[in-house]
Image (cartoon, helix red, strand yellow):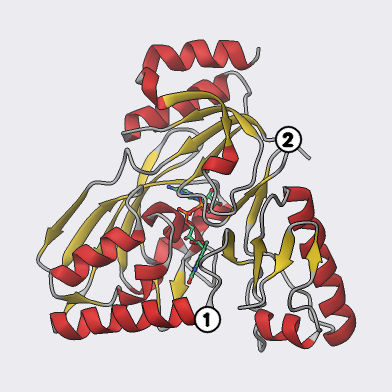
Amino acid sequence: MGIELVYQQLKERITPEYIKLKEPMREHTSFRIGGPADIMVLPDSARQIIDTVEICRKNSYPYYIMGNGTNLLVRDRGYRGVIIKIAANMKGFKVEGERVYGQSGILLSTLSKIIASEGLEGFEYASGIPGTLGGAVAMNAGAYEGEIKDSIEWARVMNPDGDIMTYTNKQLELGYRTSIIQKEDLIVLDCGLKFRRGDREAIEAKIEEYTRLRKAKQPLNMPSAGSIFKRPVGYYAGKLIEDAGLKGARIGDAQVSEVHCGFIVNTGNATADEIIALINYVKKQVKEKFNVELQPEVKVIGEP
Ligand SMILES: Cc1cc2nc3c(=O)[nH]c(=O)nc-3n(C[C@H](O)[C@H](O)[C@H](O)COP(=O)(O)OP(=O)(O)OC[C@H]3O[C@@H](n4cnc5c(N)ncnc54)[C@H](O)[C@@H]3O)c2cc1C
């Protein structure tokens, strides 16, 4: 019961070009880190997701859902199982008045431009978040004054048994960087969002302002996964790390960013082990100095 059998069964149901063997995960993560996934599937429909999950479960073979890999650290030995990457093959959308429908693979940056061009406001904050819509729902992504929770009306989700259900905003249990998607291993297939009419020029100006702020305050020219830690209640992770004297701290090629201490960057050929060692070092120092427990926001997967 192994990779060959799963591969053969997938080939019977999934478009062959959408199945990749021994796929280097560094090519699919914003950290540019990660060993090979045994198999990667790039589904183009809910049907292909259902089939892939069913084949994995039948063969007791692990699977993991990813979007654009911008909040993901894959270990150096890679992932033993199937990575289901819901991204460019599922990026459909439709705008109807103030309502917007999107498949989970569409990028937030693309969706934010579409929404702005329709003169709809309330999604400006998302223009610089580099993930997919599905990843944003799973994480309840947010920035500046907004988060996904503010505009989502419903999401169609699939559970591990292959049942498809439509969850309302409330049922999604969206909290700070958390949702029922993470808690119950659900897969986001598509969603409905609602915005309000606004002034197109003002909306575009706000997007420009947020872009300017990000460029000034974040190390966007280096591979990272964004904020590496969640914001602890009552503090800012970046400030605590800076006050602990850790700006620029390094382990190998992993470094606490000199631009924004809340980011860990890959300065060249960092390994996942180096990033994890630096996360643990920062956690320990901040705990010792300020008695605050930092919790990683980034998801870590792969063979230890
Ligand atoms: C430079 C930079 C800036 C960032 N700025 C921000 C920011 O301002 N605000 C913010 O919130 N985040 C930020 N991030 C982090 C990241 O972009 C978000 O967490 C984003 O929502 C992750 O989306 P993704 O598609 O890349 O998901 P991935 O990284 O691929 O996956 C993240 C999690 O979502 C799950 N997931 C992905 N797609 C689905 C799906 N279809 N169904 C179910 N689960 C799914 C995965 O299983 C995983 O648990 C930043 C990252 C970078 C690199």
Residue 219 vs residue 17, the one in the foreground: 219
Pick whichever of labels 1 and 2 is earlier in the sequence. 2
Residue matched to label 2: 77
- The answer to whether residue 242 is visible is yes
Where residue 57 appears, x then y in whole percent? 56, 25
Q: Vertically, is 155 above or below 144?
A: above
Residue matched to label 1: 217
Mark 1 nearby-residue class (10 Å; few <14, some 14–19, many ≥20): few
Q: Residue at x 49, y 46 (%)?
A: 186
Residue 248 vs residue 54, the one in the foreground: 248
Q: In this view, does 104 lie to the left or right of 246?
A: left
Q: Does the residue labelled 1 lie within 8 Å of ligand 1?
A: no
> Where the C terminus falls, by quadrant?
top right
- The answer to whether residue 14 is visible is no
Q: Residue at x 40, y 83 (%)?
A: 145
Tag nearer the camera, 1 or 2: 1
Where residue 278 appears, x then y in whole percent? 79, 63
Circle 2: residue type: Arg
Where residue 223 appears, x then y in whole percent? 57, 58
Q: What element carries label 2?
A: loop
Q: Residue at x 31, y 70 (%)?
A: 151
Where residue 238 appears, x then y in whole percent? 66, 80
The alpha-carbon separation of the residues under discs 1 and 2 comes to 33 Å
Circle 1: residue type: Lys
Mark 2 nearby-residue class (10 Å; few <14, some 14–19, many ≥20): some
